[in-house]
Image: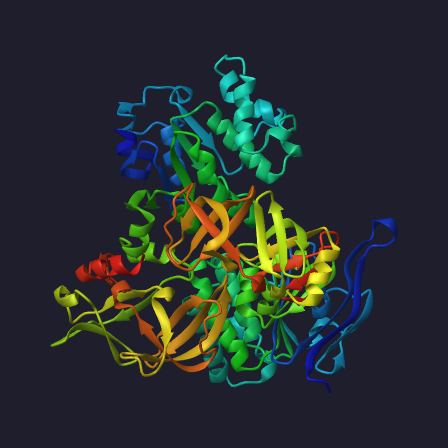
Amino acid sequence: MSTNALTISEVDKIYGTGSGSVHAVRDLTMEVAKGEIVALLGSSGCGKTSTLRMVAGFEEVSRGSISLAGRRIETLPPVRRNVAMAFEGYSLYPPLTVRDNIAFALKVARLSRSEVSEKVVGIARLLEIEDILDRYPGSISGGQQQRASLGRALIRQADLYLLDEPMGQLEPQLRAVLRGRIKHYIKERGLTAILVTHDQTEANALADRIAVMEGGVLQQFDTPAMLKERPVNLFTGTFVGEPPMNVFEAHVKGDDRRLSLTLADGFSLDYAADAFSHDVREELLKREKVVIGVRPYAVRRSAEGVPATVSTSQWLGDQTHIAADFGGHLLVLVEHDRTRLATGEAINVSIDPHNLHIFDPAGGTAISHGMGLA
Amino acid sequence: MSGLELRHVRKAFGAHEVFPDLSLEVEHGEHVAIFGPSGCGKTLLLRLIAGIYDPDAGDILMDGRSILDLAPDRRGIGMAFQNFALYPHMSAFDNIASPLSAHGNSAPTEHVREIAGLLKIDHVLSHAPRALSNGQKQRTALARALVGEPKLLLLDDPLRNVDAKLRYEMRLELPKLLRGFDATVLYVTQDYKEAMALGHRIAVMSRGTIRQFGTPEEIYYQPADVEIARLFGDPTINLLQLQPEKNEGGVHIRLSEVAVPLPGGDTLPTGRECTVGLRPEVLAFVDADVPAAIPVTVEAETPLNEKVVSLVRTSCGHELLVSRPAGTPAPASGPAHIGVDPGRLLLFDPSSGDRIALQDAVSTRGGSTT
C-alpha cells in the first residue's frame, strides 16, 4: 500500500481512429497523496476534463492504468470506484427535493434518520442552501443547483472526490467564504479531492498542488507557490498568475563584472555579474537573445531604476494596478497600497535579480529563476 | 456646463416602470461608469440617451441643450456594444467609416487611418470582421464609435465578450486610448473593478434608480448602503450583526469578547443591533500581546492573486475573511490573533441597510489611505 490515494500511470486518451482521431491526453502520469487537494487547470481542450472522466469511469483509458486506494480501477464501472462526484451534467434528481437529493447520497451508509438529517443540514448550512432544502431542483438557480450537487458529493464517504468547476456559477459575493469553508471541510476530514477548473483563482485558492495542462500534456504539477516562483516554461509562467507575468525579449551582454539585459535602445536592466550564478551566466551568454519575465507584483519603483512612463494608474480598493511604457513595451506593476500616479508621470522601475525569470526564446523552456538555474 | 444631464427621466414599458424618476449630471469630458446587476436598467439608460427610445417624461441635455428633438444620428453620440455589432460584409475600414458615409460624406481615408493607428488596428483595415480576433473586433467597434468625433461616447459593456487576459489589457489601455478624444464617456459594466478603474465617478444602479453617484474612493470607503459595500471589493466585505455597547470609554463592539472602539460612535443609538462591515484588508494578523488583539481560529487559507485570504472564526462563532499581501507570514491554521483598524469599520442600519456615518472615522480614514 502506498500513501498515494490516486495513481495515474502512463495514460493516453485518443478519441476516434485514423486521421480523424484526437489525442486528448498524452502519456499522463501523476500521483495524488491521501488528504491532498489537487486542481487540474487549463483552458478548454487541454485534456483536464478527459482526465477527470477517465478517473470517474465515464471514459475508458486508451492506454495506461489508474489506481485508487490500492485498487486498479480503470476497468471498473463508475459505481464501483468509490468516487464522489459533483459534475456538470451529473445533475440532481428532478423529482426529489434538494434535501432528499443530498440525503440520497447517504443511502448506502445505513445511518439513522436523525443522523442523516443532521448531516444534511450541516452541509447545507456550510454551503448556504439551508433555506432551499425543501425545494425542487427545477425551482432553484444554477448557482444553488451547483451547491446542492457539491453538498451531495461532499457528504458521502468516498476514496476520492471529483469536483468539476465546482464554483463557476456562484455569485461572486459568496465565493471567497465558500472557498474557505469547503477547504476547511475537506482538510478537517482528510479527504482527497481533485477539482477541474479553467479558473486559476479557484485552483490557487483551494489546491495544495496544481496540474497545469495544455494540448493534452501535463506541463507542470506543483504547489501554487512553486508555479509562480519556478515555472518550467513560458506557458506556465504566463498562464498562472493574475495579472499575467510581464514578458520581454532581451539581448544579453556581459563580462566578468556586469550582466545586462537590453530591451530596447537605452532600456537595459543592468546587474552585477554575481547576481547570477556562474552556470546561469554561462547559459545566458551562450544566447544572443532571451525572454525575460517578471511578475507585476515584483516590479519595484526605485530612484536607481530604469525610466518608464505611467500610462494608467487604476486603484481597485485594495490594490493599485499601474501600466507603464517601458522602452516601447507595456509594463504592468501592482502595488498593495493606494498609489497616486498621474498619466505621463516619469517613474523608475527596478527588478531584483531574484525576481527575474529567464526563458529560452526558441522552446520557451525556463533557463533560470533568480540567481540559479531552473 | 455639464456635458450630459438627465432631468427627472421617466420610462415605462406598459405597466412596468423601469425608471420612475432618474436624474444624472455628468461633467464635460468626464468618464462615468454605470455599474449595476443585469436588469437594473443600464442599457436602457444608454438607449434613451442615444435616442433609440424616448423618455415618457423628463429631459436629456447635452452641453445645456435638450437633445430630445434631435434624431439619433444628429446627437453627436458614438456607441460601442458588448457584441461588437460590426457589419459582417464590410471590411474593418468600411465599418469604421460607416457613421461618416451614412451622412453622405465620402469617407475621409486619412481620418479613419489615424484612429485605426491609435487603436493599433491599422494593419487589419482590409480584413472582414470574421478574420479579426475578438480584441481587434472590439477595437474596430471602438474606432467606429470614435470616428465621428462624438461629444458623448456610450460604451455598453464593451469588454464583456473578450477573454480575461485581453479584458485586463484593455482595461489598462482604454483610458489612454480615450485620452486623445475630448468626449464625455458613459461606460456600462457589471464588473466593479472595471467601474473603479475606468470611472472618474461611478453611478451605482439598482432597480431603475441610482443608489450612489461618487468617486471610486467615496463608493469604496463610504458606500451608501450595505448592498453597495457588498458589490465592491474582493473578497467581499465581512458583515456581522452586532450590538454596539456604551460605557465610560465610549462606544464599542465586541469581537471574541474583545472591545473594538467605534470612533465617533457616541451619537449612535445603542441597545439595538447594527450591521458591522469589515473589509478583509482592514483586518490583520497581530501578536497576542498587542492591545485589543482578538483571538480567533484560522480555518482555511486561500491564496488570491498575490494576496492570501484566511477564513477565521471568532470565539463567538463569527466567520471573518482576513486578507494580506502574499509573502507576509501568518498562521495557516489553528489559534491566532487579529487586529482591526477601527477607522475603517463601517456600520449599517440593520433594517434599511443604509450606512450610519461615524464622524471621526472619516478624518481617521483620510490619514490612513495615502
Residue A97, how many percent across, how many down? 50, 67
Residue A180, how many percent across, how many down? 47, 71
Q: Image quadrant of residue A43?
A: bottom right
Disc count in the image? 0
Q: Residue at x 45, y 77 (%)?
A: B299
Residue A186, how many percent across, how many down? 54, 77
Say how the picture is coloured.
rainbow
Residue B163 visible at all: no
* Front-most of residues A232 and A326: A326
Q: Is residue B111 left or right of residue A84?
A: left
Q: In the rendered view, would you say B364 is above or below A247? A: below
* Front-most of residues A185 and A321: A321
Q: In what quadrant of the picture does the C terminus of chain B appear? A: bottom left
Q: Is residue A240 left or right of residue B207?
A: right
Residue A76, how many percent across, how many down? 76, 74
Q: Residue at x 43, y 51 (%)?
A: B193
Residue A223 visible at all: yes
Q: Is residue B252 left or right of residue B337?
A: left
Q: In what quadrant of the picture does the N terminus of chain B appear? A: top left
Q: Image quadrant of residue B52?
A: top left
Q: In the rendered view, would you say B178 is above or below A305? A: above
Q: In the rendered view, would you say B128 is above or below A190? A: above
* Front-most of residues A322 and A115: A322
* Front-most of residues B139 and A160: B139
Q: Is residue B249 left or right of residue B5?
A: left
